[in-house]
């Protein structure tokens, strides 16, 4: 499992006061662009209990897949895969996220979509270098 931890500042204004979340991308959606399944955190830890302002750490244990997260108002995509026996994460480009989501609409798993979009990228590089 890959562990992702995000922070939220309860009682804070500004960037830290923005809600944080993690969603699994399951395909495309006509209204929102991408279909998302919002995930509940596996653990929630508060730094202080009796103060009006405190930092809350949310932790998710994530398996192989395509995810979007929001922390401090910044949103980003990441892919979790297994490399050398360990769960690793990387940030794909927006075009690759869209391509993976479209493949997942057709019933492909996130891991197969990752491999399919990676292969297309490798083929494109090989074609460019061969020309």
Image (spheres, rainbow, N blue to C red):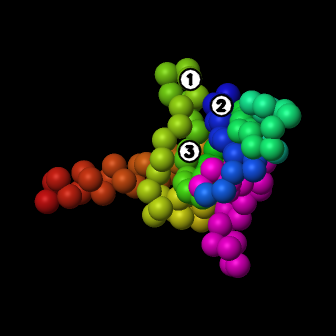
Q: Tell us which disc is closer to us: 3 or 2.
A: 2
Q: Judging from the image, what secondary structure is the residue with disc 3 in?
A: strand
Crowd around label 3: few <14 · some 14–19 · many ≥20 (10 Å) = many
Residue 38 placed where, x, y %? 77, 54
Residue 86's label in the rendered image is 1
Tell me which residue sits at (53%, 37%) in the image: 89
The range drawn in magenta is: 15-39
Which label sits on residue 48? Answer: none
Distance (Cα) linking label 2 and label 1:
12 Å
**Of helix, strand and loop, which mostly describes the magenta segment?**
strand
Residue 130 visible in the displayed image: yes
Q: Which residue is mark 2?
A: 3
Of the image marks 2 and 1, the number of the one nearer the N terminus:
2
* Element at label 2: strand
Classify 10 Å Cα crowding around label 1: few (below 14), some (14-19), many (20 and above). Answer: few
| Quadrant the C terminus occupies | bottom left
Q: CA distance from mark 3 to mark 1?
A: 13 Å
- State which quarter of the image contains the N terminus: top right
Residue lying at the far front in this picture: please name it.
Answer: 51
């Amino acid at each position: 499992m890959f562990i992702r931890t995000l922070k939220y500042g309860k009682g804070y204004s500004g960037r830290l006061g923005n809600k944080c979340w993690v969603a699994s991308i399951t395909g495309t959606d006509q209204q929102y662009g991408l279909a998302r399944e919002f995930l509940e955190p596996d653990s929630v830890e508060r730094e202080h209990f009796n103060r009006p302002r405190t930092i809350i750490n949310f932790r998710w244990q994530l398996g192989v897949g395509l995810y979007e997260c929001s922390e401090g108002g910044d949103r980003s995509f990441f892919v979790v895969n297994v490399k050398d026996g360990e769960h690793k994460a990387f940030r794909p480009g927006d075009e690759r996220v869209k391509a993976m989501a479209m493949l997942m609409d057709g019933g492909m798993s996130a891991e197969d979509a990752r491999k399919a979009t990676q292969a297309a990228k490798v083929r494109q590089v090989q074609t460019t270098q061969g020309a």
